[in-house]
Amino acid sequence: QSGDQVEIITSNKQKASEDWLNFVVTSKAKGRIRDALKDEKRKIAEEGKYTLQRKLEGMGAAFSQNNIEELVQWYKVGSNLDLFYSISIKEIDLKDLGLLAAIPPRDNHDRITLLNSVHNRLSSSAPYGLTSDAND
């Protein structure tokens, strides 16, 4: 309306930034920026998911939904995606998993499904709340 002309420069390498939410006005633009940010977070989280899977399997614990929920609760993150993302950006150090060893499992199901060999081999470093049963 003011008659101002703007030049829009585009790039295939440009990534959305949270700062952009402060500049755009329309809800459509904000929604697309949020979607782009969420997609980028998912891509980054995939690396963290793979890292966690390798770590758990190396400890003899299964990469199961039950174990992931246990870790989400332990690290006080909002969701699986937040857990994987935090691992990927090194906000969560998986060396800390040994600290879970002092925490008892949430219920008897966890205690029963934890393999004795894992408990014996990793008693000082394996999280008791993490199970080894891949069918969890």
Image (cartoon, helix red, strand yellow):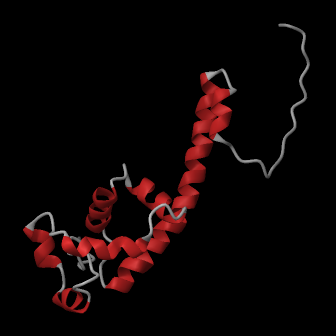
Viewed as shown, does residue 130 lie left or right of 54?
Answer: left
- Residue 119's place in the image compared with 13, above or below, is below
Q: Is residue 94 above or below residue 57?
A: above
**Horizontal and vertical percent position of residue 2:** 86, 7
Q: Residue furthest top?
A: 1
The C terminus, quarter of image: bottom left
- Residue shown at 53%/55% (left/top)? 42
Residue 91 vs residue 82, the one in the foreground = 91
Q: Report x, y in % for residue 25.
A: 66, 21
- Residue at x-position 90% and y-position 29%: 7
Q: If the image is split into quadrants, where does the N terminus sit?
A: top right
Q: Report the residue at 29% width, 72% height from top.
A: 99
Answer whether residue 135 is visible to the viewer in this image: no
- Quadrant of residue 81 in the image? bottom left
The answer to whether any part of residue 100 appears in the image is yes
Residue lying at the far left of the rendered structure: 108
